[in-house]
Amino acid sequence: MGQIKVEKNAGGIEGLCVIEPAVHGDARGYFMETYNKKDMEEAGLSMEFVQDNQSSSVKGVLRGLHFQKEFPQGKLVRVVKGSVFDVAVDLRKDSKTYGKWYGVELSEENKKQFYIPQGFAHGFLVLTDLAEFCYKCTDFYHPGDEGGLAWNDPAIGIEWPNLVGKYQGTASAEGYHLEDGTPLNLSEKDQKWVGLADTFAF
């Protein structure tokens, strides 16, 4: 058996996986394999990654909810510094869990990874002073292909931890803050996304 432990269909949503690598530590520090194709295949995960990305964000930043319209990406995400609450929303129109969400805390301490297959929206909230976020993608970035959903859409109902505020009918960050008073920080674009019902019509 490989060096990873995999929780499949996390939150009862088919395809979502929470992955815990084996960490080998001693007084000097630790070592772990952050990706091993053989181990993944033994766990039934045969996706192929073509691009690695990394971002840095300060406390209170919320990125999302993002998806790709024509060139969907599967993502294997993890945090190398700090902590985030990472969320996936099922957008597969034929899925029994369409519109459902699942979230997991990813941190430099727990070293968990979250695999989000194609057909999901994704976002995260930074819980520490700084977070460095890394992810592998199954397709390349295509300019102009990004879509988005309102991070606070009540039809989805994501329960963002440590966040205080009341929904005012838009994705604006105004009036929201973390419990310690840190203002919620979203890009201008992420404050303009609308809800699930207004984004997709089946």
Image (cartoon, helix red, strand yellow):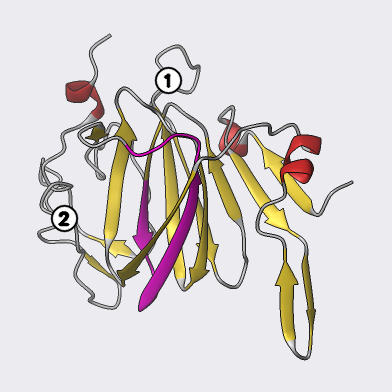
Q: Mark 1 points at which residue?
A: 92
Where 108 falls versus 159 (above or below)?
A: below
Residue farthest to the top?
202
Residues at circles 1 and 2 in contact by the CB criterion of under 8 Å: no
Q: Position of residue 44 (x, y in %)?
A: 74, 31
Looking at marks 1 and 2 on the same chain, the residue that comes earlier in the sequence is marked by 1
- Per the image, is 83 magenta? no
The image quadrant of residue 147 is top left
Which residue is depicted at the point 77% across and 37% down?
A: 43
Nearest the eye: 132 or 126: 132
Which residue is depicted at the point 59% across and 27% down?
A: 14
Q: Distance between the residues labelled 1 and 2?
A: 26 Å
Query: Dot 2 lies on which element?
Result: loop
The image quadrant of residue 53 is bottom left
Q: Position of residue 93 (x, y in %)?
A: 40, 15
Q: Name the residue under label 2.
A: 187
Residue 123: mark: none
Which residue is depicted at the point 51% across and 40% down?
A: 50
Residue farthest to the bottom?
27
Nearest the eye: 20 or 3: 3
Label 1 environment density (alpha carbons within 10 Å; few <14, some 14–19, many ≥20): some
Where 111 falls versus 157 (above or below)?
A: below
Q: What span is colored magenta in the figure? A: 123-141
Residue farthest to the right?
1
